[in-house]
Image (spheres, grey):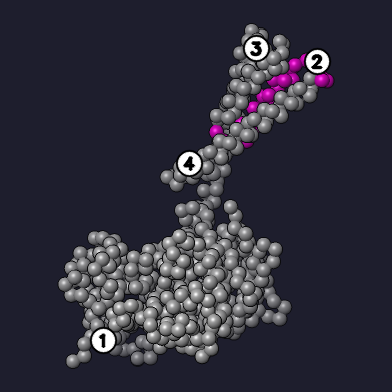
Amino acid sequence: MEIKDRILIVEDDKSIRNFIRAILEANNYDVMIANTGTEAYSLITSQCPDLVILDLGLPDMDGVKILKQVREWSGMPIIVVSARTHEKDKVEALDLGADDYITKPFGTSELLARIRTAIRHSRTTYLSPEGGLTGTFSAGGLVIDYDKHRVYVDGNDANLTQNEFKLVGLLGKYAGKVLTYDFLIKEIWGPNMENNNRILRVNMANIRRKLEKNPTQPKYIFTEMGVGYRMLDPD
Amino acid sequence: MQQLQKRAGRKFLPEIIKNCGITVAILGAATVFCFFLQNFSPTDTHVPLLFVLAVLFISRYTDGYLYGIIASMIAVVGVNFVFTYPYFAFNFTITGYPLTFLAMLAVAVIVSTLTTQIKQQEQVRLEVEKEKMRGNLLRAVSHDIRTPLTSILGSATGILENYDALAKEEKLELTQDIVEEAQWLIRVVENLLSVTRINGDSARIKTCEEAVEEVIGGAVIKFKKRFPQVNVEVEMPRDVLLVPMDGVLIEQVLVNLMENSVLHGKTTKEIKITVSQAEGRVLFAVEDDGQGIKESILPVMFEGGLQSREGEEYDSKRNMGIGLSVCMSIVKAHKGNMKAENLDGHGARVAFWLPTEGEE
């Protein structure tokens, strides 16, 4: 018998719950449902689902609280679903450890793609505890060689500087996931450079000029306006 | 209310300095003028009158009652000290002195009251105007929402109630309609959210230096998701261009403009976005090869088919008013501007510019 991934849907709206459950079951996932935050937390601790789809607006508590609680002891993939559209909510959820953030309204194909990415990502990080910083990453014509500290586009060395490599490396390590501006700045330049958006924008612009044929229609690194950057899913 | 207080608190000190400055300057000017007149006129009768005038001006140009009253007191005492006999000494025994004092005080209080009232009325008028705009927007939106909702409801109940009677293709077609109409609704709502962002808590947008290519890239990806068949070409300077803006809002503007090109240009196959830089501005132009914009709509299109709904174009199909008026208010909030024109051959060009220098 095939082992299905188990997904917990935490959502208080019946019709949204229904349609998510329907498409997930149609796509071979095992589905659990929680209506409230307390119910969700007890299911998460007792059942350890492979992925949690978490609505932030719950009747009994703010979904952010569950996110924080779970992140204290587990790195299980959590996708936050919310009707809050302001980027600062997205950034908050991502910085608190959500793997992804989907804004209502969303399409089913989008949801399924995010679920696949999040599950795959949790698997790969489980396999290599150092976070996959050795070996290579490849997506489309882009190859990141973590051992040699080189990035190749269609076989040609992109000649990235050290910081540029660090940025691309980081995005590749978390490919498919949006990394927030603050996270990237902290990782590359340290905590003192916080809020210095300019340096990040300029570096990304330079990277784009080295990696992308057309910087305004990127193929590898995408901008999530107001939130951060995301690398194309690996092959 | 709270927010108003906060704003008042933040602006408190500069306000005081400004008002004191005005008071001192006007009183000073009156004094200098009186000294000047003393050379020509042997009498002092003009002095109190000039100072009444000064108090009037002060009451008019400062906020609240306080400055006018203070000014009138200074004026009364000062006039007594400087311009009445004995010069440069106080003499409170002059006949009619209390009367002068009372008259000046009365002028100050009355003028301050009047100007404050006028200012309040102005405020009320602005509020009313805002309310009116909101009402118009609501009306336009409910029109824009009702049509797709009707279609969604109709298609869905159609499928539910006639599930067995309908052929599979018909059901698919109806479901496809539901999807399209829902997507339309999403766009309406997104535009509305943008408006609330501008009129939101601070009435000012929060800008941050964004790379123009990222904003355009994001907009093109969003647009392409919906119209994969339309070719988008981008032409911009090779250098990195950082412009202070609210990236999400400007992205929305670009998406709106591109979608309008397709929805209203009808025959649009190709869209070209051009970015150029000139004297403290960055110019974004969206050109299409569609049917162009009707000459009658051109002058009013940004006011948002909200007030004027003449012509079948507005009423029959969803109006482009909301999208465009949202674009306009976003650009205006950035202290930029926007204009539209028809291209010589065919197609239309909508362009907006943003200042490259952030204020403050």
Residue B287: x and y in percent read: 64, 77
Disc 1 to disc 3, C-alpha distance = 98 Å
Q: Residue A142 placed where, x, y %? A: 48, 86
Mark seen at residue B90: 3
Question: Do the residues at pointers 1 and 3 share their chain?
Answer: no
Chain designation of label 4: B
Q: Are marks 4 and 1 on the same chain?
A: no
Look at the image and tell me whether residue A68 can be seen. yes
Question: Chain for mark 3?
Answer: B
Q: Which residue is mark 4?
A: B9
Q: Quick check: B189 above or below B53?
A: below
Give the letter of the chain under mark 2: B
- Going 71% across and 29% down the picture, which residue do you hit? B29
Q: CA distance from mark 2 to mark 1?
A: 104 Å
Q: Which disc number belongs to residue B42?
A: 2
From mark 3 to mark 2, how far is it between C-alphas? 20 Å
Q: Which residue occupies the foreground of this view, B254 or A210? A: A210
Image mark for residue A28: 1
Q: In the displayed structure, does residue B288 sit left or right of residue B249?
A: right
Q: Quadrant of residue B210?
A: bottom right
Query: Few, some or many C-alpha atoms within 10 Å of disc 3 (few <14, some 14-19, many ≥20)?
Result: some
Residue extent of the magenta highlight: B39-64
- Quadrant containing the N terminus of chain A is bottom left
Q: Earlier in the sequence, mark 2 or mark 4?
A: 4
Q: Is residue B320 above or below residue A143?
A: above
Q: Amino acid at mark 1?
A: Asn
- Looking at the image, which residue is at 83% across and 20% down? B40
